[in-house]
Image (cartoon, helix red, strand yellow):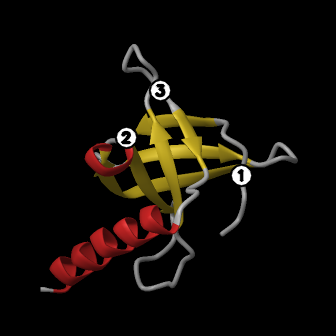
Amino acid sequence: MTEHNHDHTHDHDHEGHEHITLVDEQGNETLYEILLTVDGQEEFGKNYVLLYPAGVPEEEDVELQAYAYIENEDGTEGELEQIETDAEWDMIEEVFNTFMAEEEE
């Protein structure tokens, strides 16, 4: 996984895709689309997002980015944080595998 700092913006395009712009330590901005959101409130007290680079053709392999998403108390934009535990990764992997199996049906 590539490390990014936590700066991001959240946007929607006309097709209903949600976008997040991540800014790395050098100030480079990269636009990502949200592939999947994972509700981990019950287990870990936070939600998660799986992101992939925007504009990449569907048949091309991409490296997914996964982050914990901590929403601000007022419900506006929140913070992206690195995922810290194997238990969190295991839960995200299980949800992702289920998602991919459903997409292939």
Q: Which residue is drawn at 72% across and 44% down?
A: 5
Q: Residue at x 46, y 76 (%)?
A: 57
User: From the viewer's perspective, is residue 29 above or below residue 62?
Assistant: above
Left or right: where does residue 98 sit relative to residue 4? left
Element at badge 1?
Answer: loop
- Residue under label 2, please give it: 45
The residue furthest left is 105
- What label sits on residue 4 in the rendered view? 1
Count the marks: how many?
3
Q: Is disc 2 surrounded by few (<14), some (14 to 19) or many (20+) residues within 10 Å?
A: few
Q: Residue at x 47, y 26 (%)?
A: 77
Q: In the picture, which quadrant includes the N terminus?
A: bottom right
Q: In the picture, which quadrant includes the C terminus?
A: bottom left
The amino acid sitting under disc 1 is His
- What label sits on residue 34 in the rendered view? none
Left or right: where does residue 7 sit relative to residue 9? right
* Spot occupied by residue 55 in the image (x, y as percentages of width and height): 51, 64
User: From the viewer's perspective, is residue 1 above or below residue 62?
Assistant: above
User: From the viewer's perspective, is residue 91 above or below residue 9?
Assistant: below
Label 1 near label 3: C-beta < 8 Å? no
Label 2 near label 1: C-beta < 8 Å? no
* Spot occupied by residue 2 in the image (x, y as percentages of width and height): 70, 65
Q: Residue at x 31, y 51 (%)?
A: 43
Task: Name the front one of labels 1 and 2.
Answer: 2
The amino acid sitting under disc 2 is Gly
Disc 1 versus disc 2: distance between alpha carbons?
22 Å
Disc 3 versus disc 2: distance between alpha carbons?
17 Å
